[in-house]
Image (tube, helix red, strand yellow):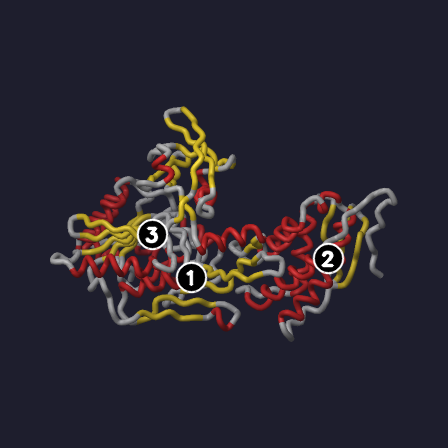
Amino acid sequence: MAQEAPRAGVHEAIAPFPREEMQAVFAAGFAAILDRHMERALPSDLITWGLAGFTAHDPSLRVERQGRELRLMRARRALISRLLPSDSTRGKPEAIGMTATEALMPFQEAAWAASPAIRDQGRDRLLRTGFNAIFGHLDPFSRYVTPEEAQLARERRLGQGSVGLRLAAQRGQVLVAAVTRDSPAAAAGIRVGDRLVTVDDEMVLANDLPGAELLLEGAPETEVTLVTQRAGRRRNVTLRRVAQRVETVTAASRDGVLHLRISGFTALTSAQVTGFVEAAFAGASPPRGLVLDLRGNRGGVLSQAVAVADIFLDAGEIVGTAGRHPEANRRYSASDTDLAQGRPIVVMVDGRTASAAEILAAALAERGRAAVLGTGTQGKGLVQILLPLPNGGELQLSWSRIVMPSGWPLQGAGLLPALCTAGGDEAAATALAALRAGQQPMGAVLARLRALRPPVSALDATSLRETCPGLDGVEREADFAQALVLDAAAYQAALMR
């Protein structure tokens, strides 16, 4: 027989449990996870994990499960104890998700009635911790997005405001790496090398550059206040964001080599790369080779990474995705035109190269179309989709894995370079000399990488990543890339076999 939480005292006013919203959001989320997440989850697991996340705000509560019986405990007393529903997955995900949610609601309501700490969290925080506890058992990148976060993300996709700064991490500090000419930051006198201390009163951290960059973003014509430091002196600067056309590609020519820096992948990235490449090869002196700089590129639109790879590949498979849902299984193939006309390509990567950027680098390396230089990449080889929720929030759901044509996955180990720069300039020079002599310093490691098959164990991923840790690049990294492009013997030795 079910044991229910005791009623609150007569004089205690308890806000009513927001059952209707909780049930609607969890039901939609459970249905999406059961139907589309790349990992199979049982309804009883979703209930147990979700309840554990919901109650995590009160250490006096714990969740116990024995077989099909689930209990919410305080000390040795069960606040509520019930049998979990069947784990049958026959039928529509919406119906199964609703059944699981209806089983979860009495437990959440009991926890709400018993715990002021839980009631103090607010709906969005309870939803976030509930879903994120579930995703903690499934994958590292899926997450719940609050309605406010979802709205900001939609605004960024439609039109992003900028203050004209690019950041970098150095010796544990966040520094200004570049200032766009005629930007709000330039007008305020911010210079390259200035330390960024806070953004809108939030500290910025060198180990979370994406978070610092996200704080700078916002809708055009909104204001952001920075605290910067130069020569030990701090100052407050308020900047008004301006609308920008996001240019993700910049180009420069150096001694006959076309250098393209790709900072992210938006709807315009492949068109921008195509324009630079076609213009370069239409000139009187076509490039002798190309360098694609993907350092610090956190990814973006998957189809754009595939489209950029297609610019440099002849016919054949570029990359594949694999998931449980039929629509998650896809194969992307190249057309029969290499706009770079077979010239050597070197791709530069580092520990912040992630997602779509890793896909581009790996696709060119896999086909022997480019040599990779730098350090190990982040190892984010999962594809996410955004699914709307009834409260205006979203689930960012991992629904497939990236798999290279020969079968190895990016998730976990990431991509490793043929010329590793993690040891500094001297070690990089030694590796380049070995390649010139026809040797392959990273050959055995790359063979191990390509032999991986999903799912990759954490031990295997860590072992491979430690061979060339994903650190910031060395000072002369672009010089090594230039040299590798122009040295035919070294370039051939650096191609993935």
Q: Quadrant of residue 49?
A: bottom right
Q: The C terminus appears in which quarter of the rendering? A: bottom left
Residue at figure coordinates x 37%, y 69% from the top left: 332
* Residue 43, quarter of the rendered image: bottom right
Residue on which disc 1 sits = 409
Q: At numbered mark 2, what does the secondary structure look like: helix, strand or loop?
A: helix
**Label 1 – label 3 distance at C-alpha:** 30 Å
- The amino acid type, in three-letter code, at marker 2 is Arg
Frontmost residue, 253 versus 344: 253
Determine the secondary structure under disc 3: loop
The residue sitting at the front extreme is: 221
Q: Is residue 471 above or below residue 460?
A: above
Q: Give the label on residue 19, or none.
A: 2
Q: CA distance from mark 1 to mark 2?
A: 41 Å
Q: Residues within 10 Å of mark 3 (few under 14, many from 20)?
A: some
Q: Which residue is mark 3?
A: 247
Q: Which quarter of the image is occupied by the N terminus?
A: bottom right
Mark 2 or mark 3: which is in front? 3
Return the x and y of residue 89 as percentages of the image width and height. Answer: 64, 72
Task: Report the amino acid beneath label 1.
Answer: Pro
Residue 115 seen by the camera: yes
